[in-house]
Amino acid sequence: MNRITKLLHKQAYKRIKDSNHILLATHEKPDGDALSSISVMIELLENLNKAYTAFCIDEPPVQFDFLPHIEKIKTNKDKIDISQYDLFISLDCGSLSRTGLHEEINNSSQKPFIIEFDHHLKIEDIADIEIRDSAAASTTEILYDFLQFNKISINKNIANCILTGILTDTAFFLYPSTRDKTISIASEMLEKGARFPQIIENTWRNKSLGAMQVWGKALSNIYLNKKYGLAFSVLTKKDIEQSRATEEELEGIAGFMSNLEGVKAILLLREELDGKIKGSLRTSRPDIDVSLLARALGGGGHKKASGFKIKGKLTKEDNVWKVVDN
Ligand SMILES: [Mn+2]
């Protein structure tokens, strides 16, 4: 870790201590890392006796109810007046638009100071203090550095959150984003009281029947494009509605597909409720950067795991899936 990063972590902590009213936000359709990151910050702000609001535009999936402070996350943005806050902390977002608060922040007469903690590849310059490490396996891994540099002790709650972020974002150390440091932080979190069986039980086990069936559907729909070494699959709105699987349950499918042997990358296209199609790209090959394709399609993410959204719907013609206008 270089000196500049260490300095940024210290500046961020000073800013937090000097602020009076703090707005925390994480990304839409929050995953384990997003919610764990916001929980770590809530724990810290409560210990500092700070007034804060924690916000996520979508309701946290119920399987994360085991994380501390989850019930304190607000999802109604009508109640949020940006000008009331002197500090805005964005966690695990990739871009400001993923908080759902970008218009409010950009149009606010009094823009708050912005601190960003993130491990996605950079898309935009929004933060006054930007702590980005695209080599980190999770945003909670970056928050671990933040706590270390600022000599903030890690209690059981924080240890549980940091480990949850790491485990869910790496699919339990399976994804290539896992590095030596990831494993060593995870091991330290276990020593500090993180409850591994509880995390596994809530995030990996406990899959609903619908989730199993929709995974099966996606897996049986896999097509291979031998020319490009790409495997892809589709899930239609109907498939998803019938399964009643949660967002989090659908999230793991693309990662699992990347276990397919002999392909360079995989693409999962699925229809969302709002007339858009979400594309998830994954690769386990060290020489492939799928984020280039995601970016070309207006998305972003990581080299090994990225995504995009396009308008349209999926139709099957002559046994070939196509994206067509709504
Ligand atoms: Mn993350």
Image (spheres, rainbow, N blue to C red):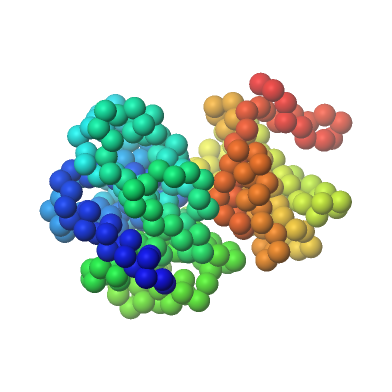
Name which quarter of the figure residue 289 lies in: bottom right
- Residue found at the very far front of the displayed protein: 4
Say whether residue 289 is left or right of residue 46. right
Where residue 272 sits in the image (x, y, percent)? 57, 33
Instruction: Report the quarter where the N terminus lies.
Output: bottom left
In the foreground, 264 or 241: 264
**Residue 26: percent from the left, percent from the top?**
38, 45
Look at the picture and state if 11 lies above or below 279: below
At horizontal 34% and vertical 48% (from top left) the residue drawn is: 128
- Give me the residue at 78% from left, 35% from top: 321
Direction left: furthest residue: 49
Quarter-wise, where is residue 257 in the image? bottom right
> Could you tell me residue 90's position as x and y percent?
36, 47
Vertical side of 218 occupied by 132: above or below: below
Query: Residue 274: x percent and y percent?
Result: 54, 27
Q: Quadrant of the C terminus?
A: top right
Q: Residue at x 36, y 77 (%)?
A: 188
The answer to whether residue 253 is visible is no
Q: Residue at x 42, y 40 (%)?
A: 96
Q: 47 or 10: which is nearer to us?
A: 10
